[in-house]
Each structure stands twice: as C-alpha cells, then as structure tokens.
C-alpha cells in the first residue's frame, strides 16, 4: 500500500492532537498490538482501533454492559457483553489477555471515580511493560464553558463526577509512582495516560489513603490569608 495514502487514511481515523490520535500514535510503535477497550457504545473509537489492528496485525478486545456486537465483523475484534469489573469472566473469555497481557487499555465505560479506581487496580497487572492505560472524561472544562441555568443541575453533577474521577486517578498514581508515569491531556473532556514502568503481571501497590487538607480550608483560605496579612501589618 502506498505510504502517503496510508498516512492520509490514518489521519482521518486518528486526527492529530485528538485523544484517539494520541492513542493511535502510541499503538503505531507497537508490534502486533493488543488492545483492551472498556465501553463501546456506538463504536467510534472501536472502529478506529479495529482499522489500526488490521494494518498492524494486532487484536482488540472490547467489553460493554450492552450488546455492541454489531459494530464490526472484523476478525481482529472480539466483543464481550459484560460488566467490566467481572475480571474473572472477562479473562476467561479473553485468554490471550490472561496469558500474555495487553499493550493498551482504554477506559471509557462507567464514568464514576470508584469504578475507574477498581478497574485500574484490577487490570493494571495485565498491561505489559511500556504499555499504557488511557482513561477518558476526566476534565470538566467543556461543561463549565457551556453552563446554563436551564441545565445547571446536570452540569453541576457532571463536573463533580469528572473531578472525583480525576482525583481517583491521581491517588492511584501517588500510590504507584515507581511503577508508572502519569500524564493528563486537556480538551475533549480530558484524557489520562498511565505509562507502565513495571513488568507484566506485577500487581499495583495496596491502596494507601494519603493525607490531604479539608476542602473547607480551601474555601476559607483566601479569607484566612487576608486576615493573616492584616495581623502582620499591625
């Protein structure tokens, strides 16, 4: 295949600067990449991944709570209708992942902090060294920019969910700093990336809650600071 045509087609599937583009650029460096995708819905990212795995002789395994099996008939794609937290069921159906691990995990299923945290702790060991986990929807700026009184409650809750998810991801990183690098990309509701430094099948560290200041202090800080400055002036 002509390389220019391939590159032009690649950019239509993985636009430069987009989140799917960042994942595509990561996968292109892998030989016969294996992908595990949580969340399919209409199959937008799934179809791009399938296209790339067909070019690179890779495999993509997708899990969704709903039946999305009609997204593609590609031999490079396997779909499982399941709760992605049921790891034993997932791995029993995807034996290659259980035995050989994956190069990339894409988390785009249930966007709640506790769910994402559980997925990270369950599946981290199955990512190969120099592989990555990408987590979608971790920044709320698009909701804040489009705030309206009419939709205020929906936007309010969505912003909280994204903030809590972002915090959960940082907590995972702080507990595993020697095993992974963490990068946060902005735009398109945010994208997190864990680049794995540790070996395949190495477990993440046990969760340890880290100290943090009370949120009330953050709210009161500007006023406390002004008060402190007034006392100093006296």
Image (tube, rainbow, N blue to C red):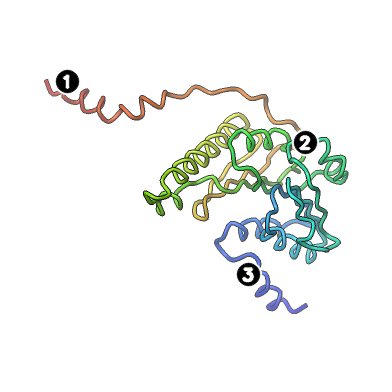
Residue 145 spot, x, y in % from top left: 40, 53
Residue 113 location, quadrant? top right
Residue 202 location, quadrant? top right
Query: Tag 2's secondary structure?
Result: loop
Query: Tag 3's secondary structure?
Result: helix
Residue 58 spot, x, y in % from top left: 81, 58
Residue 200 spot, x, y in % from top left: 78, 39
From the viewer's perspective, tell me whether residue 189 is left or right of residue 93: left
- Residue most toward the left? 234
Query: Tag 1's secondary structure?
Result: helix
- For label 2, the residue is 86
Mark 2 vs mark 1, foreground winner is 2
As measured in the structure, the alpha-carbon distance from the residue carrying label 3 to the one carrying label 1 is 60 Å
Sequence order check, earlier mark of 3 and 2 = 3
Residue 163 spot, x, y in % from top left: 49, 39
Residue 95 location, quadrant? top right
Q: Residue at x 63, y 25 (%)?
A: 207
Q: Nearer the viewer, residue 198 or 210?
A: 210
Sequence order check, earlier mark of 2 and 1 = 2
Count the marks: how many?
3
Q: Nearer the viewer, residue 31 or 24?
A: 24
- For label 3, the residue is 11
Mark 3 vs mark 2, foreground winner is 2
Q: Is residue 103 visible?
A: no
Residue 58's disc number:
none
- For label 1, the residue is 231
Image vertical order of residue 221 relative to residue 35, above or below: above
Pointers 3 and 1 in contact (C-beta within 8 Å)? no
**Label 3 CA crowd tier, 10 Å (few <14, some 14–19, many 20+):** few
Q: Is residue 231 visible?
A: yes
Q: Residue at x 63, y 32 (%)?
A: 176
């Amino acid at each position: 295949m002509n390389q220019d045509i391939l590159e032009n087609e690649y950019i239509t599937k993985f636009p430069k600067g987009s989140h799917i583009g960042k994942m595509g650029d990561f996968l292109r460096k892998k030989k016969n990449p294996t992908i595990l995708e949580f969340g399919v819905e209409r199959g937008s990212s799934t179809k791009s991944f399938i296209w790339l795995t067909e070019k690179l002789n890779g495999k993509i395994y997708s899990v969704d709570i709903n039946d999305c099996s009609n997204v593609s008939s590609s031999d490079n794609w396997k779909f499982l209708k399941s709760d992605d937290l049921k790891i034993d069921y997932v791995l029993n159906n995807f034996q290659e992942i259980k035995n050989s691990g994956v190069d990339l995990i894409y988390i785009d299923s249930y966007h709640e902090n506790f769910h994402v945290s559980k997925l990270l702790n369950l599946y981290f060991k199955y990512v190969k060294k120099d592989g990555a986990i990408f987590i979608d929807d971790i920044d709320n700026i698009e909701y804040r920019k489009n705030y309206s009184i009419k939709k205020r409650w929906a936007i309010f809750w969505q912003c909280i969910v994204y903030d809590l998810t972002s915090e959960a991801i940082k907590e995972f990183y702080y507990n595993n700093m020697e095993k992974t690098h963490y990068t946060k990309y902005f735009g398109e509701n945010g994208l997190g990336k864990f680049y794995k430094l540790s070996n395949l099948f190495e477990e993440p560290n046990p969760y340890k809650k880290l100290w943090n200041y009370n949120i009330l202090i953050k709210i009161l800080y500007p006023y406390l600071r002004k008060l402190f400055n007034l006392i100093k002036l006296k």
